[in-house]
Amino acid sequence: MRAMRWLAMGLCLGAALISCASNPRDGYAATNLYPKQFQSVAATIFRNRSYIRGIEKNLLEALTKEIESGTPYALANEVSADTLLKGTITDARLLELSKDPTTGLANEMMFEVTIDFEWIDMRTGKKIVAQNGVKASALFVPSAPAREPIELAQFAVAEEMARDIVAAMQTEW
């Protein structure tokens, strides 16, 4: 009985090891996740087609911090950069999630932003990455006692969006 258990465990372990090693291109990588042929990125302020102003500045600030801290690329101006990151804020909206039954004022609100962006090789003019309709959202509570300002949600959305953009810059592996 004990021998059967050891045999079954050995077979399971062997199958697991074989499946992990079947394709060395799948799974985790110890190498750099970003394209190696580029050394620098120029991040431009996104065009803002929404009625809420200031999002584009928050996004650029979050994006530059995320590129500096999370990628091997240096930030540069458009003239000297290998690549260009640009985009458009296509929509920004406030969604009311719940109301106070007594006052009728919003208890919880969601701030949602949608963007289109492109990462372009400046030497060839070809798009490295292009994504449309990328969304990020953040919850905030404008009512008492929290009284969180909308800027808190705008900051959170910009941070999330910057992480998503930088993640999209990684090579497919």
Image: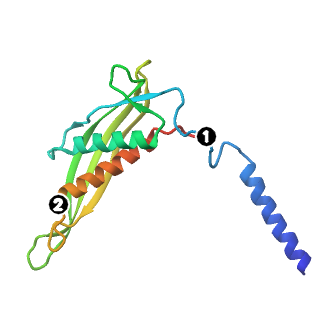
Please state the horizontal and vertical placement of residue 10, each as a whole percent of the image. 84, 66
* Label 1: few (<14), some (14–19) or many (≥20) C-alpha neighbours in 10 Å: few
Residue 49 vertical placement versus 160 (above, below): above
Of all residues, the one furthest to the left in this rendering is 103
Q: Are marks 2 and 1 in contact (CB under 8 Å)?
A: no
Residue 94 relative to residue 19: left or right = left
Residue 15 relative to residue 24: left or right = right
Q: Which of the numbered marks, if any, corresponds to residue 149?
A: 2
Q: Residue type at mark 1?
A: Thr
User: Gap in Å between the C-alphas at discs 2 and 1?
Assistant: 42 Å
Q: Which of the numbered marks, if any, corresponds to residue 31?
A: 1
* Label 2: few (<14), some (14–19) or many (≥20) C-alpha neighbours in 10 Å: few
Q: Residue type at mark 2?
A: Pro
Q: Secondary structure at mark 1?
A: loop
Residue 162 vertical placement versus 14 (above, below): above
**Occupied quadrant, residue 82:** top left
Please state the horizontal and vertical placement of residue 161, each as a whole percent of the image. 34, 47
Foreground residue, 31 or 1?
A: 31
| Quadrant in the picture for the N terminus | bottom right
Write the residue at 29% across / 42% down.
61
| Quadrant in the picture for the C terminus | top right
Q: Earlier in the sequence, mark 2 or mark 1?
A: 1
Write the residue at 89% across / 79% down.
2
Colour scheme of the picture: rainbow
Q: How many marks?
A: 2
Please state the horizontal and vertical placement of residue 102, each as a whole percent of the image. 10, 80
**Occupied quadrant, residue 138:** bottom left
